[in-house]
Image (cartoon, rainbow, N blue to C red):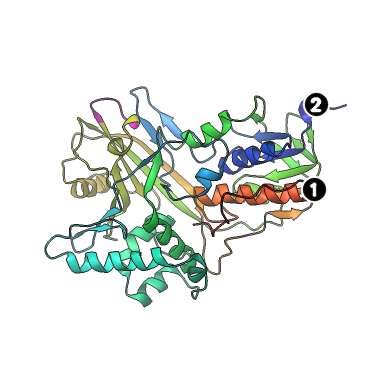
Amino acid sequence: MLSSAHHADVVIVGAGVSGLAAAHHLIAAGVSVAILEAADGPGGRMATDRTAEGFRLDRIGQLLNTSYPELDRTPGLEDLVLRPFAHGALVHTEDGKQLRAGALTPVRALAGRSLDQARLGAALGRLAALPVERVLARPERTAAAALRARGAMLLRPLLATLLCDPQLGTSSRVADLALRRFARGRLAVPEGGAAALPELLAAGLPAGTVLTGVRVRSVSVNVVTTEDHGAFRCRAVLLATGARAAADLLPGLRVPAFHEMTVLHHAAPGVLPSDGSLLLDGDPRWPVAHTAVMSAVDPTRAPAGRSLVTTTVLGPPPPLRTVASRLARLHDTSTRDWELLAVHHTPEAVPAMPPPYDLRRPVRVVAGLYVCGDHRDSNTVQGALQSARRATAAVLRDFGIPVPAPAQPLPAAA
């Protein structure tokens, strides 16, 4: 006979952001939960390494936005502190100009740059003012094709950063929603590193909810079988893993293509001058997508008297000397004394979202079997959290439990 430790109303497979958020929603509705995680700790891809010197190094360079509604709707994130970048983003264009991208931010255009600056601001301003329904009614094509048709190629480096997609093969509707959200909020990172977000979620759950080091072998509607920890009986199973792991357990699920990402961290002596801007490289001849003096945005990420520069490449690791050369230009300083702390390459960093793309991919497989994650909505933290809310709402409906209304109607994820 199985012990009570091997039974819960819902067994969640995966302790990433989606699984942890789903647990909070279910527990708030009076449903008992067990989360099974194969790794040694929760968090999934939102991981932060801590060095002996006191640097905090994120493994994936995915950015948050202060306008993400799910950050306010998800129980357990009340104490999350976001550190926003300076308004907009500073784009270094292919012809050597510097433009501040941010439709709702006053900009002092420099001589010779005002026309491009005005075009950039106008394009973002139009999207910021559009209702979501109007955005979703636009013809769908690739983001690159939409930019060419609109004569808005100045937005290319910004979109590549927001979508983690250097070729802009993403659905134009998803791209427009991402630009709209960018224009209405501010890009930001969690204080203390990306891992601070899942750590908050995990800490807010009842003791014993998250079971780590548990590798799942198979799932059905009322039992989860593990390799070394026996069977967990339940009323429902929620897969909250990445897309590939979910498809391994449920072969009918489609595995999307992915975008790869490389994050490089450099330590610089002293405190580098910075206004906390995110610097975007618009010159395709160089590998850098975006870079920032991260310690100027979030001082907890570097020890006193040192600077942390975090750089994201949307692709495989490039030659380090090439990166150093480009960073010297982007940051307008010598990089000779910089120390490379880490290079993190993630081949399957985020799911791709090519057209036609459904921002509401099904989360209910059958009664008793559900799936959530950034592969069910958009490939952002907002999408991961929103998919968790949708999946738990489906569970509660099948259990006959009233579904709590969100603070406001759910918009399309971006």
Instruction: Report the disc number at residue 4.
Output: 2
In the rendered image, is residue 14 in sight?
A: no
**Residue 402 relative to residue 77: left or right:** right
Give SS at disc 2: helix
**Residue 128 relative to residue 363: left or right:** left
Q: Nearer the viewer, residue 400 or 249?
A: 400
Q: What type is the residue that disc 2 sits on?
A: Ser
In the rendered image, is residue 45 in sight?
A: yes
Span of residues in magenta? 301-306
The residue at the point 55 percent across, 69 percent down is 356
In percent of width and height, residue 133 lies at: 52, 68
Which residue is the site of mark 1?
400
The residue at the point 29 percent across, 61 percent down is 284
In percent of width and height, residue 34 lies at: 70, 33
Q: Label 2 to label 1, Cα distance in Å? A: 23 Å
Q: Which of 399 and 402 is in front in this view?
A: 402
Give SS at disc 1: loop
Of mark 2 and mark 1, the one earlier in the sequence is: 2
